[in-house]
Image (cartoon, helix red, strand yellow):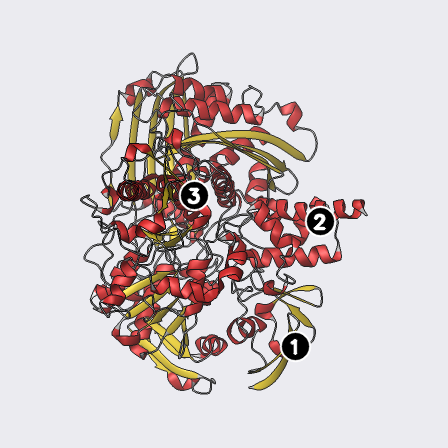
Amino acid sequence: MSDALHLPKAVEDALLAINQPSRRSFLKASGALVFSLSVSTLPGTRALAAESGAAVGPYPDPDFLQLDTWIVIHPDNTATFYVGKTDGGQGTGTAFRQMMCDELDIAYDKTRLVMGRTDITPDQGGSGGSDGVERDGMVMRRVAAEGRRVLLELGSQHLGAPVDMLAVANATIALKSDPVKKVTYAELVGGKRFNIPLTGRNVDAATGKAAVKPVTELRVVGQSLKRYDIPAKVDGSLKWAVDMKLPRMVHARNVRPPFAGATLQRIDESSVADVPGFVRVVSRGNYVAVICEREEQAIRAARQLKAEWKRPAAAPFPPSDELFDYMRRATPTSTSEPKVEGDPAAALASARHVVEAEYEVPFQGHSSIGPAHALADPSDGQMTIYSNDMKSYGLRIGVAKFLDMPREKVRVVYMDGPQVYGRTAADDAGFEAAFLAKELGRPVRVQWMRDEESGWDTKGPAHVFKLRGGLDDQGKVVALEYEACSADHNHLWYNEPDTVLIAQLMGRRPANPAKGSAEAPTSMYAIANRRTTTRIVGLPMIWETPLRTGNLRDPNGPQVTFAFESFIDELAAAAKADPVQFRLDMLADAKEDDVFRKARSLAVVRAAAKTYGWDARPSPKSRAAAARGKLLSGRGIAYTYRSNTIVAVIAEVEVNRETGRVWAKRLVCAHDCGLVINPEGLQHTVECGMLHGLSRALWEEVTFDTENVTSVNWASYPSLRHSDTPAAIDVVLVNGDPTPGRPDLAPYGAGECSHKPVIAAVANAIYDATGVRLRRAPFRSERVLAALTPTST
Amino acid sequence: MSIVKLHVNGAVHEVDVDPSTPLLYVLRNDLDLHGPRFGCGMGQCSVCTVIIDGVATRSCITPVSTVRGKVTTLEGLSTNGRLHPLQQAWIDEQAAQCGYCQNGQIMTAKALLDKNPNPSDAEIRAAMDGALCRCMTYYRVQAAIHRVVRGTKAAGEGK
């Protein structure tokens, strides 16, 4: 039988082999041949494709309402799980396997997982919004539970005993009364199809008849199993999307406009004719790429190509040092209906003390460590794209529309890649590779360069905030007004054929730019009188721009929380209250909700303070202490939630008053995401999320003049480094649910939450250390030093 | 194009390329060694790091024709199927998130420990400072290096 996957064998081996925990011994024992055999005899969707003679396509949507789409039991009593998600490095793949193993009653090391392959895994949307474990993991649990139910019924027939007299462990069903009488899953369905339909109006609702286990019966969930993907990532054996190579493949490099909004006038193709291996220049509209046989040749040709470009009539954007003034003055593209509770105006008018402050956060980039890349193969009239795009399904549909191909003829093979904390340029590279592959009729590998990635990838939107709050005689917050302004007009979503950069440069435009968002803060604080308004502003040029906004790890969360939790700290300072107690008092007055956010918020703030060893006192530290020495130390807290996950971060900083350098010496995070699937994996994700927040707090800022982004490499776009790393990080996993052992305790998302309050916690710590409030992120040395230096009069 | 002779991971290779080609592309595209990866092409991030005669070298800015010494890539660290202690420590500490930059982290750490098997925390931070990670795994990476240093010390004391 022909190979049903129809992928280069090395890739196939890598895709299936990496999640064998004892990979080396397994490979040694079984040999690579066994892998290819087991692949070609898989009874699931892939075999179906092969049976219908369609090994090279088309690739119809895998049917999420068939159990066989999700789970395959092999003759050797192992299983492969097929899920429509991706793993950006937070260990979600390991977590998915743990959840499915528990429900199916199979040992973890007897399973494999295939993710994000649009032709053979059900479309669960890929990754995003930290909902992989929370939402999609529950679907996986349900289908695995259904697999167990069906196997138990088959086992009952096989052993001639009712289901309630059977016990299941390690993929083997045995009579409770006589365990010698047993049958394995493989003996029941190994190499065969389940043929069991599921129900559900969409993939998120997919379910069988079986109920999932109560969490008290989960055994694999809750264990700190090591991630299956790390061994192959540290010995160099894993094939990543960036490593993919095919016969006849050529290399492409994009040639971007030399200034934003430029119009291509003329290309002098003779300027690259002498480049060895030169294949072609492809251009359409303002999109230009050069193609060469070898990678270094394509780089040279892209640099050498002469083209004439015309500047736009008006400057596409204000320079970054005038950005916030521009945003304050700009006419909004949309304004939210004010959300009012109580009578904030009256409460402010009668307040004993009124505090006002404004905060600013610049554009910040994904700036992926590995610039965007993709390989597209147009063989056999189909299109296969090898990509690390976290939304492989969207990429498939988007490319099909873009190239006007039936979607059944397009598939995306998700493979590991560099960081995907939201809508990176991985989307763009996938479209570009597919377009060029179709033009050339050869496999084309697209690789962005560093300046292109940092310059042209999507950005987290810049924000300006204005807050006003009132305190009564007792120092209690009686009113709070919040105004957020976000430069987020034409926010890019995922894989939309008219919004990716190549389509924009070709002159394609969606009917309307995406509105974007500006958000209200998330906290459980009880404040009787509140007014919340948000508005969005656009920059002058919204198409073909390097200042494209797109989702960056909790898209507005870090910015909003910086402003809001800094301001809460300012109110606490005005009330001369301890910042932790001040927050606890506002939480204590809150109303409880259906996911117990009040109780869990209180538990999280208390746990953070306890773990840190917080001494209750108002900020800032006494002036007498601050006057001594060149290093000033202080601590700050910030609390928030994202969806159902609650978090509090305490930062301890050292501020060098001579250089302005801020070092976060210690970070503490208390984190409640409900049911924990893999404690060690979670802890690392929380740690790294905090450090990403620290990078945004201390370093990250997209700069630009009126026609180009100027922060285009690691010198002009500095990022956190080893020398910035805290000496200590403590993560405490809290379960603040009022009935913490309840059998239906749900897992909530954890990929983004710890990232969210860090800028605020650092700002609050700097204030505690120095008595100076920084309201403009990032807190780079020169900005801190300027703030610490009294202006001469 | 011209023939360039390279010593990589104990084997000798001859490739026919433009002599100015960065070593990175020869390793990745001609020798199929994918441990070193493209990150910046400017020597700023260390994702492409290989070790040449004991020195951590940015292969993205090293013309292949200038390479005279013996090149070790991530693939060359394990011996007889046994992982290098750094690779094992990376697994023990679960140091990676996405893992894309970890070649640079591991190879930079190896060059450090080969010269100084017992670095202080400050020396580790200084030596590793050019190895960027956008998932921000620095804390775990440092823990993994400390783990190897402790192991080396313990082995030394056991003798």
Residue B123, numbered circle: 2
Same chain check for tags 3 and 2: no
| Inter-mark Cα distance, 2 to 1 | 30 Å
Residue at image position (55%, 82%) is: B18
Q: Nearer the viewer, residue B123 or A114?
A: A114
Is residue A190 positioned above or below A332 on the image?
A: below
Label 3: chain?
A
Query: What's under tag 3, amino acid-wise?
Result: Val
Label 2: chain?
B
- Label 3 sits on a secondary structure element that is strand
Query: What's under tag 1, amino acid-wise?
Result: Thr
Same chain check for tags 2 and 1: yes
Classify 10 Å Cα crowding around label 1: few (below 14), some (14-19), many (20 and above): few
Asked where in the image residue A244 lies, by quadrant, the reply is: bottom left
- Label 2 sits on a secondary structure element that is helix
Which tag, 2 or 1, sits closer to the chain's start? 1
Classify 10 Å Cα crowding around label 3: few (below 14), some (14-19), many (20 and above): many
Is residue B84 positioned above or below A648 on the image?
A: below
Q: Nearer the viewer, residue B44 or A83?
A: A83
| Inter-mark Cα distance, 1 to 3 | 45 Å
Residue at image position (61%, 56%) is: B106
Residue at image position (47%, 35%) is: A760
Give x and y (percent) for residue A601: 41, 25
> Which residue bears the numbered disc 3?
A361
